[in-house]
Image: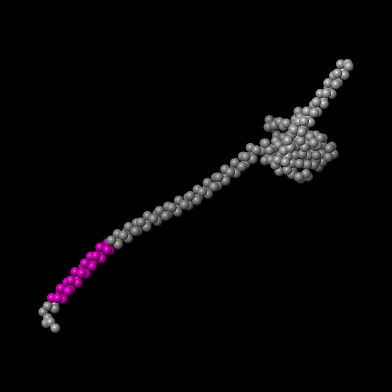
Amino acid sequence: MDHKSKLRQIAVAAIMALGVAQGACAQAQPDNNAASGVVSQPGATVALPSTPLPAQTQVQTSALTPEEAKQSAAGNVAELQQMIKGSDLSELRTTYNGSYGASLLFHGKEMTYYVALFQQKNFWRVIKTQDSARAEMIYRDFVRQTMQLSDVEIRRTQLEAQKAFTERMIALSQSRANRLQADLDVARQQQTIVANQQQQTRAEATALAQQKAAAQEQLRAAQRQVRELQRQLESGLPVH
């Protein structure tokens, strides 16, 4: 066997080994679509993003091959932006998690799939392929990324709501405490007034009791005097 034949056999063996490795990687990729966020039905109208995010914010995804990872830089974002303006593109799936989303779109005339990852209305990454199974795999991976990326955002939203709720409860509790304090102040003030009135009434009652005792003593003295005068008056009269 000549040198060229040996090189040809080595190349064929390497290609076959690469194909087996890629197939195993595809089977190992988890299906996270069922655990994703809200998924729109095929044909639903979605406001898709239009502007790519800064390059420094991009993250790598294990579902993409090195060639696919370079596609966005090759113009797929601009191409998809242009196609969205027309009517040839069909939306197959879209998933939202927080402000992040992933879409699977289909260009029927060219039998081409576009898989997009975006935040709000800004395209992050766009992958173009004619392999439907590959498009589904990349879409599921993008959905997984939206779940991971939105975790902090969702947590922040929840914490903001909890903080606002707590502050509202504090305000309500403080208002209630203020009303109770006002009621307590009125009760204490009224209690002081009543106590003063009771003290004054007791003093008046004591004075009246003393006056009554003095008057009764005067009455007894007057009655004694009347009896004595009556006795003296009757002492010179004949007895019947």
In percent of the image, x 19 and y 69: which residue is there?
A: 221
Q: Position of residue 84 (x, y in %)?
A: 78, 40
Residue at far right of view: 1
In percent of the image, x 72 and y 38: which residue is there?
A: 32
Q: In the figure, residue 152 lies in which quadrant?
A: top right
Left/right placement of residue 104 relative to residue 239 reads right
| Quadrant, the C terminus | bottom left
Numbered disc total: 0
Q: Position of residue 230 (x, y in %)?
A: 16, 76
Q: In the figure, residue 51 lies in which quadrant?
A: top right
Q: Range of the magenta residues? A: 207-232
Between 4 and 59, the one nearer to me in the picture: 4
Q: Position of residue 83 (x, y in %)?
A: 79, 38
| Quadrant, the N terminus | top right
**Prevailing secondary structure of the magenta residues:** helix
In percent of the image, x 53 and y 49: which residue is there?
A: 172
Between 4 and 131, the one nearer to me in the picture: 4
In percent of the image, x 73 and y 31: which residue is there?
A: 62
Residue at far top of view: 2
Q: In the figure, residue 2 lies in which quadrant?
A: top right
Q: Is residue 115 visible?
A: no
The reply to whether the magenta stretch includes residue 231 is yes
Q: Is residue 185 visible?
A: yes
Q: Is the residue 240 above or below the residue 178 in the image?
A: below
